[in-house]
Image (cartoon, helix red, strand yellow):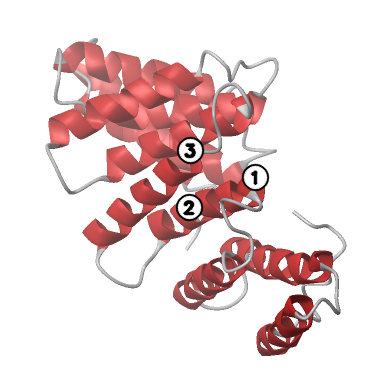
Amino acid sequence: MNQNNSLDNLDFEAVLQAEAITHENWRAGGIVFDELKRSEEALEDLGIAYMSRIVGDRRENIELAISYLMAALRILTETDFPAYWARIQSYLGNAYIDRIEGNKRENIETAIAYYTSALRVYTEADFPTYWIRTRNRLGVAYWSRIEGDRRENIETAIAYSTHALRVFTEADFPIDWALTQHYLGVAYWSRIEGNRRENIETAIAYSTHALKVFTEADFPTYWAIIQNNLGIAYIDRIEGNRRENIETAIAYFMAALRVFTE
């Protein structure tokens, strides 16, 4: 991301107008191509900023993010700027996974298509970290997927995230490692394949591992989500004493409420 752009003072329509003028001048040989590229980077930055935005309506922010990112692709093409292009494909995948507008089934399929496109550039050889992150996000998309066979989608999600742990170690990539542990905890709790008792135990183990990084002090939202997930897992738990499992579940739910206030 270009860190030098002022996102607060950048007007979308003004950027588009300036871009149109710049493009004509560039074609006539009057302005160097880098100026046009910088305007597209500004649009990309705006898209990323709106994806992260807390203020305002979440639905509108995601739609704005998609618009800015799509606008940036007019110049930041796969041919001319493959790394930029792949990054935008990946962000568009994130945006469509979170999208509220439109049809959920179609949004997830669009996200999968964007992540898959990004992997044309983000290869294991050239961009190993981005490659594995994108595959990990594909795992999330397949877990969320409505299209296709649910059993197969969950197995695909587990395969992507399990593979990610070969790169995302706790020592070198603690946040990515913890996120992947969290993803796997959710996937194993949902799993149809295999033994239900073992799947729940595996889900509990992955979720508990994630809490080594996602502490209440440092990552309260993730911490609370995982507390809630563990509560659900203990409600469903077959292993152990039923009375104790329910009491453990209640304790996890109560802990989550320290963050999830009314």
Q: Residue at x 44, y 18 (%)?
A: 163
Observer-side mark, 2 or 3, equals: 3
Which one is nearer the viewer's eye here, 182 or 218?
Answer: 182
Q: Please report the residue visible at 29 percent of the width from the left and 38 percent of the height from the top.
A: 143
Left or right: 193 as drawn, with respect to 60: left
Tell me: residue 92, above or below residue 33.
above
Q: Label 3's element? A: loop
Residue type at tag 3: Arg
Q: Earlier in the sequence, mark 1 or mark 2?
A: 1
Q: Nearer the viewer, mark 1 or mark 2?
A: 1
Where in the figure is residue 181, as x and y percent of width and height?
Answer: 47, 24
Label 2 sits on residue:
94
Residue 69 sits in quarter? bottom right
> Please, is residue 22 above or below residue 154 in the view?
below
Rounded to the nearest angstrom, the CA distance separating label 1 from label 2 is 17 Å
Residue identified by numbered label 1: 83
The quadrant where residue 169 appears = top right
> In this orientation, does residue 197 appear?
yes
The correct choice, above or below, for 195 with respect to 98 in the image is above
Name the spot of residue 230 as percent of width and height, x first: 37, 30
| Amino acid type of the residue that numbered disc 2 sits on in the rendered structure | Asn
Q: Which of the numbered marks, if any, corresponds to residue 120?
A: 3
**Residue ID at (57%, 78%):** 56
